[in-house]
Image (cartoon, coloured by chain):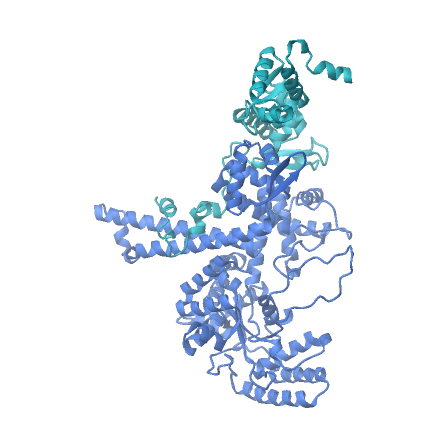
């Protein structure tokens, strides 16, 4: 264990100055979480100029790399070259260069929705198999499919149900978790209807707390009402 | 506890229907709680005549209930028999119209504004629609009379219908038949006791709670004064919907000049009963030690006096709002399950609710009454859509309806409370989606479903919302009272601060309900404003609005008329739809 550790730490120590070695060891000890420059300064007690110079040299030698920390993109975050950044740093598999990959998520959601709509009822394993058969999304993990399905449930596009073993559910064992589209017409059946409150101007008004019958903002003077009634 | 805009909307309805003076009296009762006549006069600064007339109108239309606080009565009974004695004393005092305070002076009658009944006035068109579809057009007309006039005797209903008509005999027969149909369906009921005696003291716990007891008593909110008054006032089930049960005393009420009470004696036989009963009460109070037997004697005596025959000129009837609300609740439950599951599940739920509604003691029941599978199947196969169902299909639907296993006695109960909660969640989520956008909608639904505190980053990961964007959306939802937030400080190697978020449903629903009352008030005010703006159009002769006239003036008039018509239709229908949401959050 110690031998392996010694190998990982400053393996090319001949090429490193003392300062570089100290900085590298601190960075390496943080493994896949990495560290930013202020924390390096606190832990090494080295002057900032020396730290910066050491980091530059280590980067040139390929011993460390800079990564984007999703929680604070303005801070420079460093990691030993041999580690892949943790999800807490990158944001997870849905993040690319520190940004949520909305396009990728949207396309994966559409694939799942289309599959469920065509099959009426589907379960996670069936969806995963279908996705991985296709070229673009092959390599999608179970956890990622679960997240996408959870996301579709939160968006009220699909419902999570348990198989009764009858009718549309006869392919699935009783009690197995399945999914079906929320609207009976499937994915392309348009938006769901809005509730009673959301269908009127007051329901979406950001100023409702300031509105009163005889006040400056009132139903008689309301601009939202004016637009709503402007046929 | 009614919200700020709940009261404002109720006052608005009273103003529209009965005018500002009556509304002022009603508003005073809302602001200050139950008051006596003298107190209302002092608070409103109206004349005694104006206040009395206003109270008459409000009582007539079931918007106010009078009662006598029990702590002002001198007659005390052992707690064991208090319910029976209270009932008996109400019947005596009903005829006697005398209540004495401890010092022998007149105890004052207090008046309580009934918020629910006032809001029900908004939904009269729905009640009429129910009567029309469930029964027939004639029943709708009879009910319309009751809703317009508040309370009527059967004689008055007949008089109302035959006025100015030929063939009064046939019409009278139709009215009587409709009356009986409405009564059988429980859509009308006897009017409540005019001035019941009600205890205003909060009940203490009946038994001391054992420490560490696992069977901890479920918290129940204490009964409000309104609930107690209504419970005391409503006639017993045996006579509430019965035409032929005896009644004691004259049920018709008129204004009286007496400051302490609005109740009048009625006709001569009533006066005789008054004198007799007053004498008997004094005798009982001073000399009788066995009050229970004396009261039994009184009851038999009154039965003999009345002859056990209903007097159709004296018994007052009114619309039974509770039954209409029950009907609307059932309708919502069935339609929601139809949307969520399928027609089959809706048919089964509808059959269960139809057969169990007679045993429902109140509207807001949490579970349907237990029924065996055989009973459910029998009821389902009686329906048009359920005729072809098999028992296995029924069983599978019961599972889908959230009733996977039977009760210990092999019966099934549907969790109705959860269906109502789902409907409420959907309504609130709809507001969040429209007001804050789809990312906030996902976040809100995540928190609503998890029903526990979640940390900001966890929310961002689960809802797949950008981690930078998530705190901003959470803050917006929190600022508008849709979320509850707590800060957690963890001190380890270094201090970390976490923000935890949660949806507090009971609080949120109260807040949303108040917003809905506010929105309903706004809709009503705007509707009135639009009508006022184009009031002249409503008096334009119809031929001027005919499209055949191609002149520019006529075109402009037609355009204005069409706009007004569309505006009134849109706002009217929106108000009715919003009222469904008000019932969902308040009455169901």
Up the image or down, A138 lies above or below B12; here it is: above
Up the image or down, A101 lies above or below A211; here it is: above
Quarter of the image with the C terminus of chain B in it: bottom right
Please report the residue visible at 44 percent of the width from the left and 49 percent of the height from the top.
A208
Please report the residue visible at 57 percent of the width from the left and 86 percent of the height from the top.
B274
Up the image or down, B586 lies above or below B229; here it is: above
Q: Please tell me which residue lies in front, B88 or B444.
A: B444
In the picture as drawn, the residue positioned furthest to the top comes out as A14
Query: Relative to residue B205, is residue B39 drawn left or right?
Result: left
Query: Relative to residue B269, is residue A164 drawn left or right?
Result: right
Up the image or down, B466 lies above or below B158; here it is: above
Residue B360, quarter of the rendered image? bottom right
Query: Relative to residue B525, is residue A98 drawn left or right?
Result: right
Position in image of residue B73 (x %, y %):
62, 80
Q: Please tell me which residue lies in front, B16 or B141.
A: B16
Q: Please tell me which residue lies in front, B517 or B480.
A: B480
Quarter of the image with the N terminus of chain B in it: bottom right
Residue B62 visible in this rendered orientation of the protein: no
Residue B275, quarter of the rendered image? bottom right
Residue A75 visible in this rendered orientation of the protein: yes
Q: Colour of chain B?
A: blue
Position in image of residue B217 (x %, y %):
73, 58
Query: How many marks are shown on the rendered structure?
Result: 0
Position in image of residue B386 (x %, y %):
63, 46
Q: Colour of chain A?
A: cyan
Position in image of residue A221 (x %, y %):
35, 51
């Amino acid at each position: 264990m110690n031998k392996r550790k010694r190998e990982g730490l400053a393996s090319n120590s001949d090429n490193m100055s003392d300062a570089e070695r100290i900085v590298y060891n601190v960075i390496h000890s943080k493994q896949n979480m990495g560290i930013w420059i202020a924390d390096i300064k606190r832990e090494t007690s080295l002057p900032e100029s020396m730290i910066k110079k050491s980091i530059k040299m280590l980067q040139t030698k390929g011993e460390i790399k800079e990564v984007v920390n999703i929680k604070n993109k303005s801070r420079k975050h460093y990691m030993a070259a041999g580690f892949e950044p943790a999800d807490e740093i990158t944001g997870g598999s849905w993040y690319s260069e520190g940004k949520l990959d909305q396009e990728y998520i949207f396309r994966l959601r559409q694939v799942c929705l289309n599959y469920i709509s065509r099959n009426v009822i589907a379960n996670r394993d069936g969806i995963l198999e279908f996705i991985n058969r296709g070229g673009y999304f092959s390599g999608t993990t179970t956890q990622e499919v679960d997240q996408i399905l959870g996301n579709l449930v939160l968006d009220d596009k699909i419902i999570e149900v348990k198989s009764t073993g009858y009718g549309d559910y006869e392919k699935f064992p009783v009690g197995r978790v399945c999914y079906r589209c929320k609207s009976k017409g499937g994915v392309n059946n348009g938006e769901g209807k809005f509730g009673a409150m959301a269908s009127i101007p007051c329901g979406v008004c950001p100023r409702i707390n300031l509105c009163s019958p005889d006040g400056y903002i009132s139903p008689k003077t309301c601009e939202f009402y004016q637009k709503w009634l402007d046929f | 506890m009614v919200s700020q805009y709940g009261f404002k909307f109720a006052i608005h309805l009273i103003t529209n229907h009965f005018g500002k003076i009556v509304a002022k009296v009603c508003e005073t009762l809302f602001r200050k709680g139950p008051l006596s006549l003298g107190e209302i006069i002092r608070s409103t600064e109206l004349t005694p005549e104006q206040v009395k007339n206003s109270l008459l109108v409000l009582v007539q239309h079931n918007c106010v209930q009078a009662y006598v606080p029990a702590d002002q009565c001198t007659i005390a009974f052992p707690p064991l028999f208090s319910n029976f004695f209270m009932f008996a004393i109400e019947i005596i005092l009903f005829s006697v119209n005398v209540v004495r305070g401890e010092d022998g002076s007149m105890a004052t009658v207090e008046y309580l504004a009934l918020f629910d009944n006032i809001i029900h006035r908004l939904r009269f068109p729905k009640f009429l629609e129910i009567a029309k579809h469930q029964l027939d057009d004639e029943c709708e007309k009879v009910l319309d009379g009751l809703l317009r006039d508040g309370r009527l005797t059967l004689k008055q209903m007949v008089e109302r219908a035959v006025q100015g008509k030929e063939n009064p005999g046939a019409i009278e027969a139709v009215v009587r038949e409709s009356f009986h149909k409405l009564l059988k369906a429980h859509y009308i009921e006897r009017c409540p006791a005019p001035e019941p005696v009600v205890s205003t003291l909060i009940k203490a716990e009946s038994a001391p709670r054992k420490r560490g007891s696992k069977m901890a008593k479920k918290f129940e909110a204490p009964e409000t004064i309104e609930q107690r008054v209504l419970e005391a006032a409503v006639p017993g089930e045996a006579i509430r919907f019965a035409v032929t049960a005896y009644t004691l005393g004259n049920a018709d009420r008129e204004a009286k000049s007496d400051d302490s009470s609005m109740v009048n004696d009625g006709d001569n036989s009533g006066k005789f009963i008054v004198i007799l009963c007053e004498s008997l009460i004094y005798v009982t109070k001073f000399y009788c030690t066995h009050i229970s037997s004396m009261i039994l004697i009184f009851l038999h005596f009154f039965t003999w006096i009345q002859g056990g025959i209903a007097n159709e000129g004296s018994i007052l009837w009114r619309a039974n709002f509770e039954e209409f609300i029950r009907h609307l609740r059932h309708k919502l439950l069935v339609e929601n399950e139809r949307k969520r599951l399928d027609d089959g599940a809706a048919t089964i739920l509808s059959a269960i609710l139809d057969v169990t509604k007679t045993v429902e003691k109140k509207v807001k029941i949490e579970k349907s009454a237990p029924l065996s599978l055989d009973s459910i199947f029998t009821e389902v196969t009686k329906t048009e859509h359920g005729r072809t169902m098999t028992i296995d299909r029924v069983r599978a639907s019961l599972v889908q309806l959230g009733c996977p296993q039977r009760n210990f006695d092999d019966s099934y109960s549907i969790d109705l409370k959860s269906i109502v909660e789902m409907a409420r969640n959907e309504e609130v989520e709809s507001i969040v989606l429209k007001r804050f956008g789809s990312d906030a909608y996902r976040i809100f639904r995540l928190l609503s479903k998890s029903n526990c505190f979640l940390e900001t980053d966890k929310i961002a990961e689960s809802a797949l919302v950008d981690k930078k964007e998530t705190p901003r959306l959470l803050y917006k939802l929190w600022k508008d009272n849709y979320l509850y937030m707590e800060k957690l400080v963890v001190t380890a190697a270094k201090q970390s601060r976490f923000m935890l978020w949660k949806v507090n449903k009971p609080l949120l629903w109260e807040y949303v309900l108040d917003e809905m009352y506010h929105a309903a008030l706004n809709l009503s005010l705007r509707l009135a404003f639009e009508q006022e703006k184009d009031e002249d159009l409503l008096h334009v002769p119809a031929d001027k609005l005919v499209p055949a006239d191609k002149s520019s003036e006529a075109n402009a008039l037609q355009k204005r008329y069409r706009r007004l018509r569309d505006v009134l239709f849109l706002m009217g229908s929106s108000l009715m739809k919003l009222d469904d949401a008000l019932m969902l959050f308040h009455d169901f």
